[in-house]
Image (cartoon, grey):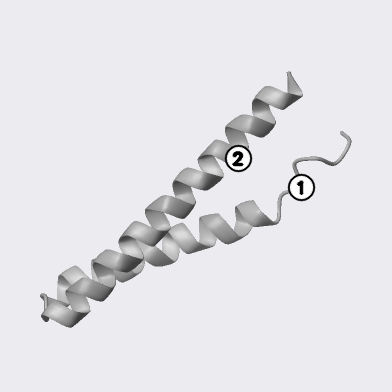
Amino acid sequence: MENYYTRSFKDIHNRVSNARAYVQDKLEHAKYDGADINFIKQLEAEYYALDVIWVNMNEVETDRPR
């Protein structure tokens, strides 16, 4: 049962990491292309939120005994 939750957690962690990389890439392109400032601010907010989630997920120890 615990393996299921560990695998699920790691899968979610990978998805957050991929989303974070995608938003970062989109943000870099938006800044380079001179996109609307509100769009850039929205992407920065999304990237910051995903980064906070990703960092907090890195702190969780999935292999420690319960």
Image-quadrant location for residue 3: top right
Q: Is residue 17 left or right of residue 5?
A: left
Residue flagged by tag 2: what amino acid is it? Answer: Lys
Q: Residues within 10 Å of mark 2 (few under 14, many from 20)?
A: some
Residue drawn at x 43%, y 60% as measured from the top left: 49
Q: Is residue 31 left or right of residue 15?
A: left
SS type, badge 2: helix
Q: Is residue 1 left or right of residue 9?
A: right
**Residue 20 placed where, x, y %?**
41, 58
Q: Residues within 10 Å of mark 1 (few under 14, many from 20)?
A: few
Residue 10's mark? 2
**Residue 59 placed where, x, y %?**
70, 56
Count the marks: how many? Answer: 2
**Residue 4 placed where, x, y %?**
66, 23
Q: Which residue is mark 1?
A: 61
Residue flagged by tag 1: what amino acid is it? Answer: Glu
**Residue 65 placed where, x, y %?**
89, 36
Residue 45's mark? none
